[in-house]
Image (spheres, rainbow, N blue to C red):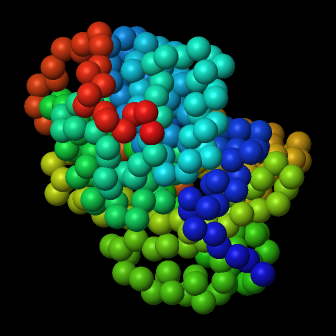
Amino acid sequence: MVVELPVIEAFDAMSADYDVVQDDWYATLDAGLEGLILATLGRNLEGRFILDIGCGTGLYSLKLAHRGARVLGIDPARRLLEQARRKARRARLRGATFSTGRAEALPVADRCADAIVCCGSVFAFVDDPEAALREFYRVLKPGGWLIFDAENRFSIDTLWLSLSGLIGDPLGYGVSRLEVLRALSTPPTRSVRLRYPLVRADGSTVYVGLRLDPPGLVGEWLRRTGFEVKAVRGFHIAGALIPSTLTIRPDLPRVIRTLFRGLVRLDKLLARFRPFNYLGTTLAFICRKPGTATPAVREVDWRLVPAAAD
């Protein structure tokens, strides 16, 4: 029987081995998102104040802090934040600070951030995505960057999920036939919520609810909020020809790993052509708040972030 856990409970349950699990699917996604972030913000981030929303154990926070940024990582899962703090202490990174919080109610002042990063499927777990985008707009300085990713309702992997659910879920997505039929009957302009597996280091699986968004709907949310969409980049386009539930396993068979890595190289070619990007399982949106960016300052006024010590 598949049991779905609340999101915070699920990630707290995985906190002990969250950084231990290494799989090809997420390793490829994380590397691609990191490259996109650095290509957008630049490699020298001295004097920048960056919010990492849904920071988890600090994957992006620590990398940004290593490049000179002052980073505030925000996440509702306290056990993940404890790990992030320990990692920052071990690395002697004073520029990375962590706080509990939700994307829809950020504990920071208006127009205080140079950039916001919200990556790693975080947006798919947000209860009210449009409210979160309004918060992102509020706290960004004019000219500030927003980089976030959304899970695409219309991807090859969603097709695998649907087919698997309809025939008894042999691929292990954790969805039932009824859930798939309900999703298929939902108008294509609306998001759907389906279950998705998270694999632990011991091979056991935790299931959480994941929101899949139509790209057009995400674009509409951004337009209503006021953001300018500068680019959309798709990840796992051809890579999704292999179901994601096979490639999120740490003990991936060599033949599948070799095939998957070949498809990932093909992804990089396909991403050069705009229409193919919208077939990506994950869509990264690079957005900007209108206005003129103010010069970066060397020190962040931490009175603007009163919850940083939480």
Pick whichever, 59 or 26, lies toward us.
59
| Residue 168 drawn at (x, y percent) | 75, 83
Query: Horizontal placement of 193 versus 301: left or right?
Result: right
Q: Which residue is at 62% across, 17% downward?
A: 91
Asked if residue 256 can be seen in this view, the reply is: no
**In this view, 180 is above or below 150:** below
Toward which corner of the image does residue 296 lie, by quadrant?
top left
| Residue 195 drawn at (x, y percent) | 61, 71
**In this view, 207 is above or below 68:** below
> Which quadrant of the figure contains the C terminus?
top left
**In this view, 81 is above or below 216:** above
Pick whichever, 162 or 120, lies toward us.
120
Q: How many marks?
A: 0
Q: Which residue is at 82% across, 48% downward?
A: 201
Q: Which residue is at 47% across, 65% downward?
A: 212
> Which quadrant of the figure contains the N terminus?
bottom right
Toward which corner of the image does residue 44 lie, by quadrant?
top left
Pick whichever, 272 or 178, lies toward us.
178
Asked if residue 215 can be seen in this view, the reply is: yes
Pick whichever, 266 or 137, lies toward us.
137
Q: Which residue is at 31% across, 33% downward?
A: 305
**In this view, 191 is above or below 168:** above
| Residue 70 drawn at (x, y percent) | 39, 21
Query: Horizontal placement of 245 versus 42: left or right?
Result: right
| Residue 148 drawn at (x, y percent) | 40, 44
Query: Horizontal placement of 77 versus 97: left or right?
Result: right
